[in-house]
Amino acid sequence: YSHLQYAGKHKCALFFIIFLCTGSAILAAYFRSFTIGTIAGMALTLTAVAAHNFFHQKDNFRMYYFDFTMMHHREWRVSHALSHHLYTNTVYDLEISSLEPFLQYLPTKKSFFFRYLSWIYSPLVYALMYLGSYIKSIIQILLIRERLPLSFILPFTVLAAMVISTSEPLTFCTAMFAWIITISSLCFGIIGVNAAHHHPDIFHDGDTPR
């Protein structure tokens, strides 16, 4: 178990990444720089990737870092840890079905629209992934009349920090916050969803055995 000695370093790295994300978001608002905002968005993507490792452990506060993306760790514990990891790239993988019909990764017969035009609109799907997940979660909670978890306000603590730490108006800070979320969502979709799981050499349910 000698490799477990590095766990402390991983935790420190995650703390540094979330600090970098929040700090660069504040600087982006202060300097009115969408370039710095892009850095904040990429740092938020790294936060999501690093925080997802803690889904597979007992309840811990680090898994809440994932909620800064506007996605919710509780849902991802089901879709990722209990579905994707057990039934990777199969019809039972919720991370496959949740993107359908817009993105169809399994080797099934597809219409011309979904087969070719998805190359064009897929970046838009990735860019709206965070926001779409947040809206879906809110609707589900309202439908079952469940109490809204406090973790749902975590993303907006970054926005609050941007407003409080700078003299910029709320409208501009909100626009910058939306830019950061969109950039992060796009990066997460391209890297975490597409590149990491759906390379042509990776097995998908329905592939010809090789």
Image: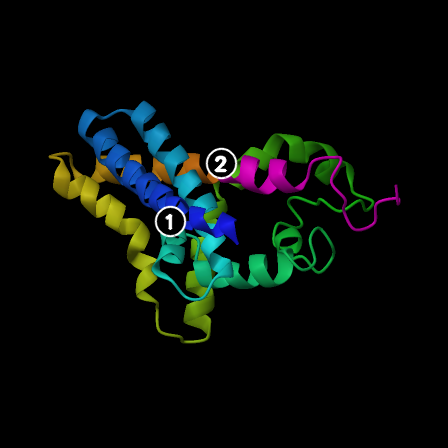
Within 10 Å of disc 2 (Cα), the crowding (few <14, some 14-19, many 20+) is: many
Q: Which of labels 1 and 2 is toward the front?
A: 1
Q: What amino acid does circle 1 point to?
A: Gly
Q: Nearer the viewer, residue 5 or 210?
A: 5
The furthest residue to the front: 2
Q: At which x and y percent is residue 113?
A: 72, 37
Q: Which residue is denoted by mark 2 in the rendering?
A: 186
Q: Which residue is denoted by mark 1 in the rendering?
A: 8
Q: Residue shown at 32%/30% (left/top)?
A: 37
The picture quadrant where one finds residue 190 is top right
The colour mode here is rainbow
Give the SS element for disc 1.
Answer: helix
Q: Residue shown at 28%/50% (left/top)?
A: 156
Give the SS element for disc 2.
Answer: helix
In the picture, the quarter occupied by the C terminus is: top right
Q: At which x and y percent is residue 69?
A: 40, 48
* Image side of residue 170 versus residue 112, left or right: left
Label located before the other in sequence (1 or 2):
1
Q: At which x and y percent is residue 103?
A: 66, 44
* Image side of residue 201 versus residue 183, left or right: right
